[in-house]
Every structure is written in structure tokens, then in C-alpha cells.
């Protein structure tokens, strides 16, 4: 529960305390003058404060609060357009386009601009090569988030949810951060790939996020080393 909701709960509790202070069995229920007796008690100031707290508390709950950050992971051209269009429908303080710098990032920027999203609200994260890095590198771009959204196809969102839960468990994300998973239409290819990738991600996360990231860096380093050796032989 974020700070505003906690404050709303507190105000509602206080409103009940103040509104019901001074109520007793001596009020004139028979003559129907309950309200008159109620507001003529010595607790009139408390009752007024109770009404004020009630209005303020309800206001905090009814208010439509935008997300602090909304992550838009890159995909192929069509996927990117779908994700960016859907993201533009969400109210957010910041939109993070996450993935290696490419044509897909440009498409996301263009879609957000078409929706009149303020460019100052758009953040570029161009180092990520997979879902885990999307999360961890995007977090580095955030300042004390209370709510985070992610937009992608359903099977991909399951993977994000898995990673976020692990990150909260390991203290890399505050446990009270509210998450919103925003789906777009999923193709058959994405369904099949997503199911297999989710199984792989679950296995990869067993030893923790740091271990998963380190394992990937080691594999990347080995691949680069091998490529350099092959070039020298040529």
C-alpha cells in the first residue's frame, strides 16, 4: 500500500472516531431530532473535523493516480507498436523504453509522441538484452517508485511477474511497490515462445538474480573471446 492510500486509511479511521464521538442514548430519537441533538453537543468541533477527514480520506481513494514508471520493453516492429500504443493509454509520470538501441526504440518514441506524451517523461534504457535485464536496468533509472507498470503480451508478463517477485524477495525492489501488468494481444508464436521462456527463467532464478546476471555475463564474455580467437585464426 503506497503512502497516499495509507494516509487515506488513517483519515477515514479518524473520521469515524470524530464523527461518532459524543453519541449517547440521550439523543432525542423519538421526536426524530437526532441530527439536531447530534450537532448541539459539546463535540461539535470534533464532528466537523470528522466530516473533513471523511471527505479527504475518500478523495485519496477516488483520485485516479497515475503510475510512477511504465516500462515498455522492446520487441519486433509490430510488437513495439502494440506495446507503445497501449502504454500511451496509461497515465504515468515516466515511460521507460527498455532494450538495446535499435529501430524498435525509435518506433516506441514515435508512438508516444503521436499520443502527445511529453518527451521529458520518456526515459531511454538501452543496455538490456533480455527480460531480467529489462527489469534490473530499468530500476536503476527510477527514483523511489511507489508504482510500476509493465506492458507486454501475457506470457511475457508472467515472466516479469516472476522476476519482480524474486527482486522483492531479495530486497532489490521495495515490497510495498505496487505493480500493474498491462497486456497486449498475444500471437501463437508469442504463446509458444513465452511458455518455454518462462520455464527457462524459473530455472535461471533459482540461485538468485545476481547469479543469473553473472552467469549471462560469463557466457557473453566466453562468446566474445571465442569470436576474437576465430578472427585471429582467419
Image (spheres, rainbow, N blue to C red):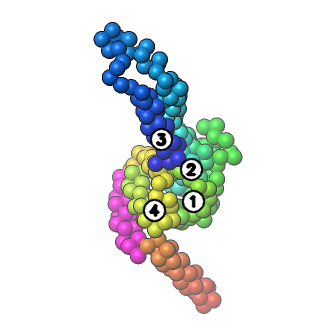
The answer to whether residue 24 is above or below residue 144 is: above
For residue 189: magenta? yes
Mark 2 to mark 1: distance in Å?
A: 9 Å
Q: SS class of the residue under badge 1? A: helix
Counting residues from the N terminus, which is met first, the one under dot 4 or under dot 2?
A: 2
Mark 1 to mark 4: distance in Å?
A: 15 Å
Pointer 1: what residue?
A: 138
Mark 2 to mark 3: distance in Å?
A: 26 Å
Residue 58 in view (yes/no): no
Q: Is 21 in front, or is 142?
A: 21
Cβ atoms at labels 1 and 4 below 8 Å apart: no
Residue 92 in view (yes/no): yes
Q: Residues within 10 Å of mark 4 (few under 14, many from 20)?
A: some
For residue 54: magenta? no
Furthest residue toward right: 120
Q: SS class of the residue under badge 2? A: strand
Pointer 4: what residue?
A: 168
Pointer 2: what residue?
A: 69
Instruction: Considering the whole magenta stretch, tell me its main secondary structure.
Output: helix
Which of the two marks, 3 or 1, is nearer to us in this view? 3
Which of the two marks, 4 or 2, is nearer to us in this view? 4
Cβ atoms at labels 2 and 1 below 8 Å apart: yes
Question: Residue at 37% across / 68% down in the picture?
Answer: 202
Q: Position of residue 227 (x, y in %)?
A: 57, 82
Query: Where on the picture, by quarter, is residue 233?
Result: bottom right
Mark 4 to mark 2: distance in Å?
A: 17 Å
Pointer 3: what residue?
A: 10
Counting residues from the N terminus, which is met first, the one under dot 3 or under dot 4?
A: 3
Q: Position of residue 67 (x, y in %)?
A: 54, 45
The answer to whether residue 8 is above or below residue 196 is: above
Which of the two marks, 3 or 4, is nearer to us in this view? 3
Amino acid at each position: 500500500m503506497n503512502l497516499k492510500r495509507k494516509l487515506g486509511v488513517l483519515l477515514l479511521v479518524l473520521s469515524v472516531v470524530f464523527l461518532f464521538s459524543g453519541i449517547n442514548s440521550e439523543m432525542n430519537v423519538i421526536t426524530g431530532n437526532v441530527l439536531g441533538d447530534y450537532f448541539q453537543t459539546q463535540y461539535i468541533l470534533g464532528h466537523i473535523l470528522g466530516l473533513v477527514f471523511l471527505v479527504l480520506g475518500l478523495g485519496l481513494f477516488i483520485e485516479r493516480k497515475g503510475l510512477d514508471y511504465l516500462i515498455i520493453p522492446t520487441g519486433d516492429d509490430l510488437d513495439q507498436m502494440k506495446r507503445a500504443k497501449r502504454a500511451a493509454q496509461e497515465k504515468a509520470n515516466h515511460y521507460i523504453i527498455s532494450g538495446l538501441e535499435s529501430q524498435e526504440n525509435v518506433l516506441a518514441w514515435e508512438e508516444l509522441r503521436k499520443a502527445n506524451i511529453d518527451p521529458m517523461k520518456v526515459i531511454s534504457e538501452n543496455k538490456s538484452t533480455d527480460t531480467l535485464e529489462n527489469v534490473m536496468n530499468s530500476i536503476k533509472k527510477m527514483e523511489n517508485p511507489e508504482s510500476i507498470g509493465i506492458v507486454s503480451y501475457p506470457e511475457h508478463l508472467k515472466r516479469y511477474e516472476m522476476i519482480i517477485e524474486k527482486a522483492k524477495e531479495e530486497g532489490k525492489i521495495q515490497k510495498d511497490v505496487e505493480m500493474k501488468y498491462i497486456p497486449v494481444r498475444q500471437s501463437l508464436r508469442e504463446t509458444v515462445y513465452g511458455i518455454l521462456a518462462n520455464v527457462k527463467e524459473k530455472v535461471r532464478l533459482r540461485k538468485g538474480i545476481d547469479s543469473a546476471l553473472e552467469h549471462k555475463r560469463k557466457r557473453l564474455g566466453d562468446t566474445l573471446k571465442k569470436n576474437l580467437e576465430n578472427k585471429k585464426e582467419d
